[in-house]
C-alpha cells in the first residue's frame, strides 16, 4: 500500500464578489454575488515511502491547496486522502506528529524570540525526549550551518537564514513525510545549492518522503526524478522528468562555434539551422539522428572551435504542456 494515496479529491472555494462602482462596497454590504472556484477536481495519485516528488504547476493550479489537504489544514468536499493509514483532517494530532511542513512564504517560528527558543517549544509540543532532541538538533544545526544565529530573534534573520531554520523546525521531530511548498523562494544561488544538497541527503539517508512544490525548475531537475504536473485542479502528468521532456519537447539544440565564417549548407536530417556570424544553432530530433552522428557529420564539414548540445528549457516545456492540455 502507498504511503500517500489521494482518490477523487475535489476542493471548492466560494469567493464573494464586491459590486463595481463608487458605491460598490456599500451595496456589497447588503448583497453580493458568490463565485464558485474549483481548486481541485477529481485529483488522484499515490506516493510510495522514500520518494522525492516534484509537484509543479502555474499559480492557482491547486498545488498549495493539495498540500494543505494532505497536511490536514483543509477538508475536501469530495474524495479520500489516506496518509500512513490516516485521514489527515480527521486524525490531526497523530497525523501532524509524523509530518513536517515548510511554507516558503509563511513561518512556523515565533517572530520575536530567539530561534533556539522556538526549537525548544517545538520539542515540548512534539514530546521529544531530551537525548533524541539534542542529537537531532546538533545534526541539523551542523549540516545547515545555523549555529551562529541560534540566539538571534527570528525577525532579525535574513530570508536565507530563516528558511534554513524553518527546515530545522520541520525536521526536528524526525517526520516520515515532509511537504515543501516553495522552500527556496527568495534564496540566493549559494543558499539554494546548499539546501538542495541537504534535502537530497535527508531523503537518501533517512528515507524521508518529500513532496516539493516550486516554480523553480532548477530545484525540480536537481532533486526530483518523478514529477506531477497540475493545471486547473487536475493532474496533467505523472512520471519521470526525462519522459516529460521527451513527450513534450523531443528536440535538442546544438550550438557550434567556428574558427571562421562558413556558408550554410543543406542538412536534411535536422529540423532547423540558424547562422549568426561564426555561430551555428542547429535544432535536431535525436530519434532521426543520434547526437554523436550529428557531431561527426559536422566535424567533417565545418572548422569547429567549440560545440555544445542543449536540451529545451524545462520552463518552456511546462508552458507548452499547459497550452496543449489546459486550453
Image: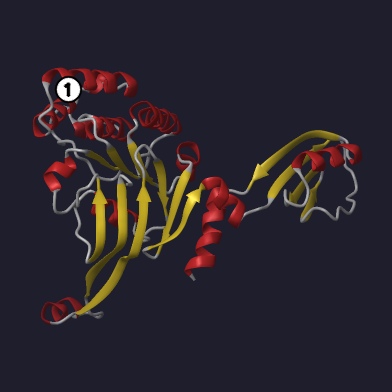
- For numbered disc 1, what is the local secondary structure? helix
Q: Residue at x 77, y 55 (%)?
A: 272
Few, some or many residues within 10 Å of mark 1 (<14, 14–19, 20+): some
46 or 33, which lies in front? 46
Res 278 seen here: no
Residue 266 as seen in the image, left or right of residue 139: right
Q: Residue at x 34, y 59 (%)?
A: 62
> x%, y% of residue 117?
12, 27
Vertical side of 149 occupied by 46: above or below: below
Q: Residue at x 25, y 52 (%)?
A: 82
68 or 184, which lies in front? 68
Res 260 seen here: yes
294 or 24, which lies in front? 294
Residue 98 as seen in the image, left or right of residue 198: left
Q: Can you tell which quarter of the image residue 195 is in?
A: top left
Q: Which residue is mark 1?
A: 133
Q: Can you tell which quarter of the image residue 190 is in?
A: top left
> x%, y% of residue 258?
83, 37
> x%, y% of residue 22?
22, 79
Q: Residue at x 36, y 47 (%)?
A: 47
Residue 200 as seen in the image, left or right of residue 17: right
**Number of marks in the image?**
1
Amino acid at each position: 500500500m502507498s504511503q500517500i494515496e489521494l482518490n477523487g479529491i475535489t476542493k471548492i472555494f466560494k469567493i464573494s464578489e464586491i459590486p463595481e462602482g463608487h458605491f460598490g462596497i456599500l451595496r456589497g454590504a447588503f448583497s453580493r454575488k458568490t463565485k464558485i472556484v474549483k481548486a481541485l477536481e477529481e485529483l488522484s495519485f499515490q506516493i510510495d515511502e522514500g520518494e522525492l516528488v516534484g509537484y509543479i504547476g502555474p499559480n492557482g493550479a491547486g498545488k498549495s491547496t493539495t498540500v494543505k489537504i494532505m497536511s490536514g489544514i483543509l477538508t475536501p468536499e469530495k474524495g479520500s486522502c489516506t496518509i500512513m493509514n490516516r485521514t489527515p483532517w480527521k486524525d490531526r494530532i497523530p497525523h501532524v506528529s509524523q509530518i513536517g511542513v515548510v511554507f516558503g512564504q509563511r513561518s512556523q517560528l515565533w517572530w520575536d524570540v530567539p530561534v533556539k527558543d522556538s526549537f525548544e517549544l517545538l520539542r515540548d509540543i512534539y514530546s521529544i525526549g531530551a537525548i533524541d532532541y539534542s542529537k537531532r538538533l546538533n545534526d541539523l544545526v551542523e549540516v545547515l550551518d545555523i549555529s551562529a544565529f541560534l540566539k538571534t530573534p527570528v525577525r532579525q534573520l535574513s530570508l536565507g537564514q530563516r528558511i534554513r531554520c524553518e527546515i530545522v523546525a520541520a525536521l526536528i521531530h524526525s517526520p516520515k513525510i515532509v511537504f515543501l511548498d516553495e522552500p527556496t523562494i527568495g534564496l540566493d544561488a549559494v543558499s539554494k545549492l546548499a539546501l538542495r544538497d541537504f534535502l537530497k541527503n535527508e531523503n537518501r539517508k533517512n528515507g524521508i518522503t518529500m513532496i516539493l512544490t516550486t516554480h523553480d525548475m532548477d530545484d525540480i531537475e536537481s532533486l526530483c526524478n518523478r514529477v506531477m504536473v497540475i493545471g486547473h485542479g487536475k493532474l496533467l502528468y505523472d512520471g519521470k522528468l526525462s519522459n516529460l521532456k521527451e513527450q513534450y519537447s523531443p528536440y535538442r539544440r546544438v550550438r557550434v562555434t567556428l574558427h571562421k565564417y562558413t556558408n550554410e549548407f543543406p542538412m536534411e536530417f535536422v529540423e532547423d539551422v540558424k547562422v549568426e556570424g561564426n555561430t551555428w544553432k542547429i535544432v535536431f530530433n535525436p530519434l532521426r539522428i543520434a547526437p554523436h552522428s550529428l557531431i561527426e557529420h559536422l566535424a567533417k564539414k565545418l572548422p569547429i572551435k567549440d560545440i555544445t548540445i542543449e536540451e529545451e528549457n524545462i520552463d518552456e516545456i511546462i508552458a507548452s504542456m499547459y497550452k496543449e492540455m489546459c486550453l
